[in-house]
Image (tube, grey):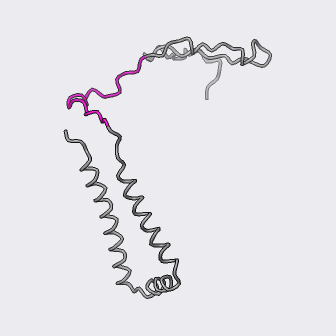
Amino acid sequence: MSDDTSEQPTAKLEDFGLGQAPKPVETPKRGDGPEPDQVPNTDAAQPAAALPEAEPAWLSQWGKAPQRTTPRIRWGGIIWGLVFVASGWFALWTMQSHERRSAFSDWILTLNDGGWAIVAAFAIGALLLVLGLIAALRAATRPRA
């Protein structure tokens, strides 16, 4: 608890070596001075300070990275887009015919534990294949240093 009549001096920002405290900004009250749209903008008159170099000093010991002259090819988006197009095409192809639809549903309903394990292994293998293909295409199109 503190009381306002304490005679102990209050520590100031300058005492901690942190510089001076910022001046409080007075906000105009209603009917007290010019309207808000008539208040001059003082920030626009002050020039912006130059920003420091964005690259850290420790990174400069390896030299500058080569500048890219062509846009980067996003292989992940291309490959995953092709995978989704192929799976969508297969779903549409399967659903178009009553015979294919009933054959697919019969196959799904007759899978036992071993069949589901094979389907899971196939799905994991397909995922690894797609990720490996993306990594290989990215490495093949990376510029040589």
Residue 57 horizontal/vertical position (percent): 27, 26
Residue 100 within the magenta-colored segment of the rendering = no
Give, as a single range, the part of the protein colored magenta.
Answer: 50-69
Q: Is residue 109 above or below residue 3?
A: below
Q: Is residue 56 above or below residue 138?
A: above
Q: Quadrant of the C terminus?
A: top left
Q: Main secondary structure of the magenta part?
A: loop
Residue in the image at 40% along x and 63% along y: 83
Residue in the image at 52% along x and 77% along y: 96
Q: Nearer the viewer, residue 106 or 101?
A: 101
Q: Quadrant of residue 4?
A: top right
Residue 134 horizontal/vertical position (percent): 31, 56
Q: Nearer the viewer, residue 145 or 42?
A: 145
Q: Is residue 9 above or below residue 73?
A: above
Q: Quadrant of residue 130?
A: bottom left
Residue in the image at 48% along x and 16% along y: 48
Q: Quadrant of residue 38?
A: top right
Residue in the image at 69% along x and 18% along y: 27
Number of marks in picture: 0
